[in-house]
């Protein structure tokens, strides 16, 4: 990968009935997404329930990625508050020639830009051969990247800091330099983001919207009149009414029951929520071919 752009799914993780991680099915699903529109996928991100997965199972999954025909299109989410675990997972990934990472600062604790710069400095000092996409999502981490922080990190580590996923939306339309790949975190922002210079999107619902999200992306770059952006945004709005992980697994379990398996403290949608989800998607004539 050079400067990356396009449609990336924050891919889900597949679990067996005993809640052990099914690496083969997880990679197979990621390959399906890439074959059906995504430029690539992020594994072990927030949508992939990464904070709930043991280190040993993360290593198992990362070690399975080289079996994929789309090996060079994977980005690894570290999904850990532990600096040591983050660095160790990155070192294992790099030993397998996987060096692109999506990293969110730790959750729970209060901290400042200064602390964030120190955190990423420690990572890069230990794992210099990495390409990092900063994950800006205040709702999950409690921290919001400032424009100054992003610029400082890019200035200090021009080769390692290559992008930002902005799910808080305080950066994507304000960072004006052309030295970062900037991704929005929702299909609702995809087209407007592209218009202000963003590189694409990394989103949870691209687990089911990959084909139409890719068409919106391609049509923009080909200067073709948009025909699917409104539908894409409406589908995202339907899923936004629910916990995204629960909604995706409930939706996809209609095609394959294995997707019913989620880790506590996540759950599937209730019967009434699932009914509402399918009714509203049916009104949009939306269905995912799997």
Image: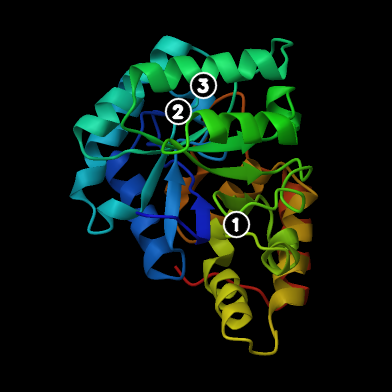
Give the secondary structure at mark 2. loop
Q: Distance between the residues labelled 3 and 2?
A: 13 Å
Residue 66, compared with residue 263, is above or below; it is: below
Q: Can residue 145 be seen in this view?
A: no
Residue 203 point in image, percent of width and height: 60, 52
Residue 185 point in image, percent of width and height: 66, 50
What number is the disc on residue 201?
A: 1
Give whichever of 69, 17 is nearer the camera: 69
What number is the disc on residue 78?
A: 2
**Measuring 20% from the left and 45% from the top, which residue is drawn there?**
66
**Measuring 54% from the left and 16% from the top, which residue is drawn there?**
119
Looking at the image, is mark 3 or mark 1 earlier in the sequence?
Answer: 3
- 195 left or right of 165 in image: right
Do labels 3 and 2 touch, CB within 8 Å? Answer: no
Give the secondary structure at mark 3. helix
Query: Residue 290 appears in which quarter of the rendering?
Result: bottom left
Q: Is residue 81 visible?
A: yes
What number is the disc on residue 120?
A: 3
Residue 168 point in image, percent of width and height: 75, 40
Query: Residue 186 appears in which quarter of the rendering?
Result: bottom right
Looking at the image, is mark 1 or mark 2 earlier in the sequence?
Answer: 2
């Amino acid at each position: 990968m050079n400067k990356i752009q396009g449609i990336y799914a924050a891919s889900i993780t597949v679990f067996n009935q005993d809640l052990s991680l099914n690496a083969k099915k997880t990679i197979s699903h990621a390959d399906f997404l890439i074959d059906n529109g995504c430029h690539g996928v992020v594994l072990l991100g927030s949508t992939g329930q990464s904070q709930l997965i043991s280190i040993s199972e993360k290593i198992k999954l990362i070690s399975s990625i080289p079996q994929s025909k789309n090996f060079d299109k994977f980005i690894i989410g570290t999904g850990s508050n532990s600096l040591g675990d983050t660095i160790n997972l990155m070192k294992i990934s790099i030993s397998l020639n996987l060096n692109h990472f999506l990293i969110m600062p730790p959750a729970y604790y209060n901290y400042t830009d200064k602390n964030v710069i120190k955190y990423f400095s420690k990572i890069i000092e230990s794992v210099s051969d990495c390409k990092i996409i900063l994950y800006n999502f205040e709702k999950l981490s409690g921290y919001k990247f400032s424009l100054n922080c992003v610029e400082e990190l890019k200035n200090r580590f021009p080769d390692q800091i290559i992008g930002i996923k902005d799910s808080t939306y305080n950066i994507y339309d304000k960072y004006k330099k052309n030295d970062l790949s900037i991704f929005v975190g929702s299909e609702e922002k995809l087209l407007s983001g592209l218009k202000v210079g963003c590189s694409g999107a990394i989103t949870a619902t691209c687990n089911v919207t990959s084909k139409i999200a890719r068409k919106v992306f391609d049509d923009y770059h080909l200067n073709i009149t948009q025909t699917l952006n409104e539908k894409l945004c409406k589908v995202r709005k339907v899923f936004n009414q629910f916990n995204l992980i629960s909604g995706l697994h409930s939706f996809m379990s209609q095609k394959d029951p294995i997707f019913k398996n989620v880790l506590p403290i996540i759950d599937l949608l209730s019967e009434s929520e699932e009914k509402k989800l399918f009714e509203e998607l049916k009104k949009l004539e939306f269905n995912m071919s799997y």
